[in-house]
Image: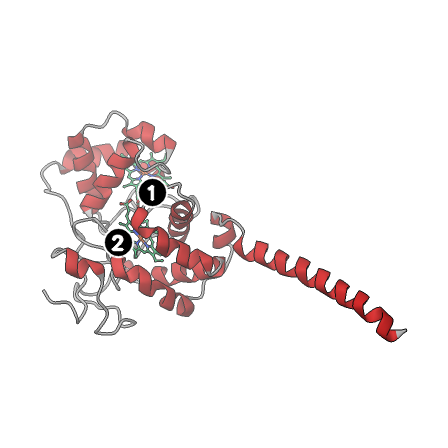
Amino acid sequence: MKTKNQPKHLLWHLIVTFILSNFITCFAFASPTLVSVSSLKGNTENGKDAYHTCALCHTPEGWGTKNGYYPQLSGQHPNVLIKQLVDIKQGKRSVPTMIPFADLIFDKGHQNVADVVSYISSLPMTPNNAVGKGDNLDLGEKLYTQQCESCHGAKAEGNNEKSYPLLQGQHYQYLLRQMQWIKQDIRTNGDEMMREHISAFKDTDMQAVADYVSRIKPDKNKVAESINWQNPDFHGDFVSVPDSTSSKTVNKSKNKQQ
Ligand code: HEC
Ligand code: HEC
């Protein structure tokens, strides 16, 4: 009797294993959303390893490059980082060079993304971000107060709850490019209401407001104590892409030949 029942048990075992493994796979790799990632508690220590690939472009300090090609990530709100990563992963914001790296962190599960974001959030901002020419700051201030403050905050500090990006202390050229791309709908995940606010802006208005914002100083406790601060989690032999492609990089890692 016992031996007769065994194949039946085996079959049930296989069916249950199949259903369970499918359930686990679906759960772990379901389409990411801001909520599915932000509801997880990030582990900064685990995020350190995953951030190594990001540092190739965003630099070990997360300061990006002064020419604005690579944005500073340090200091940005976790929900903003998560929303942008989800949008890039899903093709809602086109950053072609970053896609393989976004795939890499999402393929390891949503927890891995929460971990990288937690690590980035632990990094201090650069005290030396690039600013504009400084020749139209009154206009920049006026436009900022009238058109931007309601969402991005009085000091361009952003809002984590609402996923409004922090803009203070960001590189001038990056701010300018994003405004232009959002206005022209090249950045397709841009905010519709923001687009209306800047729809009548001329190039000079964009430059003035980006310049003004790039000069707003973040709170001292968000910024590194020196422009020579190096991320101690990276070893001397780490080489980031901007080292070879841009002489304007702000990364001062030991290995850097300036
Ligand atoms: C090959 C270079 C490269 C690598 C590697 C890379 N990025 Fe990026 N990333 C970029 C560029 C370029 C942009 C800006 C795109 C633009 O101008 O719209 C960007 C933008 C971003 C943004 C949006 C910033 C904002 O203020 O909206 C986030 C968040 C981001 N990257 C996170 C990461 C993370 C996390 C990793 C590692 C998993 C990573 N990146 C790896 C090149 C890279
Ligand atoms: C109605 C609210 C709103 C207003 C007003 C607004 N923004 Fe935004 N802005 C947003 C949101 C939301 C995003 C992020 C969109 C997304 O999810 O990709 C954003 C993104 C940006 C970015 C890209 C940041 C990054 O890290 O990539 C810049 C730069 C920016 N805004 C500048 C401005 C400036 C300057 C003004 C005023 C002229 C302005 N915004 C007015 C809501 C607003």
Query: Residue placed at 22% from the left, 73% from the top?
Result: 237
Name the amino acid type tagged 2: Gln
Residue linked to disc 2: 72
Name the amino acid type tagged 1: Ser
Mark 1–mark 2 Cα distance, whole angstroms, equals 18 Å
Residue linked to disc 1: 94
Q: Is residue 235 left or right of residue 16?
A: left
Asked if ligand 1 lies within 8 A of label 2, the reply is yes
Query: Residue placed at 16% from the left, 33% from the top?
Result: 139
Few, some or many residues within 10 Å of mark 2 (<14, 14–19, 20+): many
Looking at the rendering, in which quadrant would you find the C terminus? Answer: bottom left
Q: Position of residue 173 (x, y in %)?
A: 19, 44
* Quarter holding residue 208: top left
Colouring chosen for the image of the structure: secondary structure
Q: Residue furthest top?
A: 200
Q: Nearer the viewer, mark 1 or mark 2?
A: 1
Q: How many marks?
A: 2
User: Which badge, 1 or 2, is on the more N-terminal residue?
Assistant: 2
Q: Position of residue 192 (x, y in %)?
A: 38, 31
Few, some or many residues within 10 Å of mark 1 (<14, 14–19, 20+): some
**Quarter for ligand 2?**
top left
Looking at the rendering, in which quadrant would you find the N terminus? Answer: bottom right
